[in-house]
Amino acid sequence: MKAALSFRVYEYQAVAVARFLAGRASLPSENEQRGWEKKRLEYKGPTNNFHEIKPDFAEYFNWLSDFSGVPAKGTKGYKLPSWEEKWGELGFAVLALKDAYWKRLKAQEVKQIRAKL
């Protein structure tokens, strides 16, 4: 698993859904889900922020890992690893590099356009 942070999220979510649909994982009770939603609304508010993971990456990834459990015997599946702080650091470093790259390209484009005038 060496993909960007967003792809890790997709992988963890996909494994959790697949194992749930295969009957290998169970959702929390309705009361637990409602309690989680209430706390989440108090914490993030009734906006788009309700859906964001940051800054709670460890909590989110580890919950998905625990929820997913272990793969069925005889399959090529694997236990999702627990969150590692370096994943966030590396993920945000990649975003910073991309941002710098695009700013550099934009600056070069402006210089090239001015030179042609």
Image (cartoon, rainbow, N blue to C red):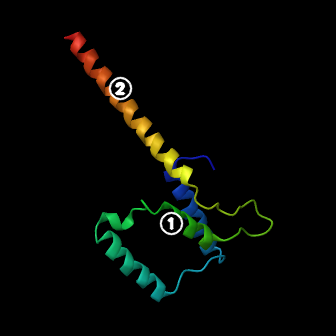
Marks 2 and 1, how far apart at CA: 35 Å
Crowd class of label 2 (few under 14; some 14 to 19; many from 20; radius 10 Å): few
Circle 2 or circle 1, nearest the eye: 1
Tell me the element at label 1. Answer: helix
Residue shown at 66%/71% (left/top)? Answer: 69
Give x and y (percent) for residue 53: 43, 62
Q: Nearer the viewer, residue 66 or 59?
A: 59
Q: How many marks?
A: 2
Q: Is there CB contact under 8 Å for labels 2 and 1?
A: no
Residue shown at 29%/24% (left/top)? Answer: 107
Give x and y (percent) for residue 60: 50, 66
Q: Earlier in the sequence, mark 2 or mark 1?
A: 1
Residue 5 numbered tag? none
For label 2, the residue is 105
Above or below, comparing residue 28 to residue 91 in the picture:
below
In the image, taking residue 92 as reference, residue 44 lies left or right, namely left
For label 1, the residue is 60
